[in-house]
Amino acid sequence: MPQKKMALDCLLQSGIPVCGGCRFEEKLIIPGVRSASRLPQNAKSVLVGLFPYYVGAKKANLSLYSVIADYHDVAGRMLDTACEKLKELFPQHSFVPFVDASPIAEVAVALKSGLGKLGRNGQLITEKYGSMTFIGEIVTDLDLGFDDCETEQCENCGKCIAACPTGALSESGFCKDICRSHFSQKKGELTEWETNQLKSGGLAWGCDICTLACPHNASPEITPITEFTADIQPELTEKNIEILMKNRAFAWRGEKVLRRNLSILKDK
């Protein structure tokens, strides 16, 4: 059995429903990311896994990706399991997992792996799950002989750009500073404009507008990952905030920012 298939089977056997791979290149490294020190020496290949998160239209006041158990933990465990299996098969080689805080440009490696196409909002669009997937990767010094795929662009319908309420998405690109998702995560006091935008959006965390505007997200498949479907909490409240801060993707930001956002929404 070719090494490439053996490696991809390790990801599938670890519960990762969509996977692929590409060659490692130095240009994929994001400058200034501290986790780059964990990359194996003489890295040759990147194994890429997708973790679908859509659990149905249950949104209340949280972005859809944050109504489920923290993907950092769930995806991290699956990637760790895959690395253990890979190490058993290829004991002379290194396998290092990354999720979110990755030194690798994650959308770029997913595109090079042929796992989807690039949306105008920068998201990876997949056939089955739309753009509602998290991306994780395993970098190895084992040459798995991947052939890179051509980067495919979306149909450029412009619906994500037209839907963006703040102009953060435009024909000229993306401006993070005026993105609702960005300032829902900012520390400190928000400006009057940011406060009004948060109120208008109605979310205590994140923003789904450009995602939901994409035609590819009209009917995505429900995630097959049971840890995501087992504990769905679509609403953040003053009563459940301490519980949700233990196992949700927004926990890293701390209670103070979330309580500020809840207070802003309460004053609508």
Image (spheres, rainbow, N blue to C red):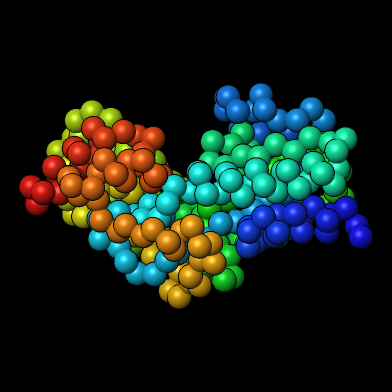
Q: Where does residue 189 sit, x and y in percent of width and height?
A: 19, 30
Quarter of the figure with residue 186: top left
From the viewer's perspective, tell me whether residue 182 is left or right of residue 27: left
Q: Where does residue 239 sit, x and y in percent of width and height?
A: 18, 47
Q: Where does residue 27 sit, x and y in percent of width and height?
A: 70, 35
Q: Where does residue 268 sit, x and y in percent of width and height?
A: 9, 51
Of residues 159 and 107, the one nearer the viewer is 107
Of residues 32 and 238, the one nearer the viewer is 238
Residue drawn at the location 33% of the way across and 49% of the way down: 206
Q: Count the labels in the image.
A: 0
From the viewer's perspective, tell me whether residue 191 is left or right of residue 268: right
Of residues 37 and 25, the one nearer the viewer is 37
Q: Residue furthest left?
A: 267
Q: Is residue 37 visible?
A: yes
Q: Residue furthest bottom?
A: 219
From the viewer's perspective, tell me whether residue 116 is left or right of residue 196: right
Q: Residue furthest right?
A: 1
From the viewer's perspective, tell me whether residue 155 is left or right of residue 163: right
Residue drawn at the location 31% of the way across and 46% of the way down: 244
The correct choice, above or below, for 14 with respect to 25 in the image is below
Q: Is residue 132 visible?
A: no
Q: Quadrant of the N terminus?
A: bottom right
Residue drawn at the location 43% of the way across and 74% of the way down: 218
Residue drawn at the location 7% of the way across and 47% of the way down: 267
